[in-house]
Image (cartoon, grey):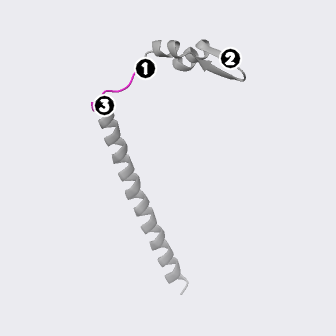
Amino acid sequence: MPMKNWAVSHANPTVSQASINQTELSKQPISSPTLTEQQQIGNFFKEIDNIIGLHQRKLDLLKEQKKGLLQKMFV
């Protein structure tokens, strides 16, 4: 939580809400991934989303199968 600690130490209390001076904030380095890394992260989450979708579809099909089997069992 280094960013939070920095923000708290540089905050100026105003009314009931703390504020941070823009000059102080602009001095704080903010790291971000390179464009290539961002694309890799995006692709990773897209792949996870696809896998979740496949598992959801499989779950739905299994629920339908269960429903059908239960109907057969009690007929």
27 relative to 10 in the view: left or right: left
Find the residue positioned furthest to the right.
16
- Which amino acid type corresponds to the residue marked 1 in the rendered image? Ile
Q: Name the residue under label 3.
A: 37
Query: Over which residues does the magenta segment extend?
Result: 31-37
Q: Where is residue 72 in the image (x, y as percent from the top left)?
A: 49, 83
Which quadrant of the rendered structure holds the N terminus? top right
Disc sitting over residue 13 in the figure? 2
With respect to residue 25, does 58 lie above or below? below
Report if the CB atoms under discs 3 and 1 are less than 8 Å apart: no
Q: Position of residue 16 (x, y in %)?
A: 72, 23
Find the residue positioned furthest to the bottom.
75
- Viewer-nearest residue: 66 or 11: 11
Q: Where is residue 4 in the image (x, y as percent from the top left)?
A: 56, 20
Mark-to-mark CA distance, 2 and 1: 23 Å
| Dot 2 or dot 3, earlier in sequence | 2
Residue at 50% in and 16% down: 25
- Viewer-nearest residue: 44 or 10: 10
In the image, is residue 53 part of the stretch drawn in magenta? no
| Dot 2 or dot 1, earlier in sequence | 2
Mark-to-mark CA distance, 3 and 1: 16 Å
In the image, is residue 33 part of the stretch drawn in magenta? yes
Q: Name the residue under label 1.
A: 30
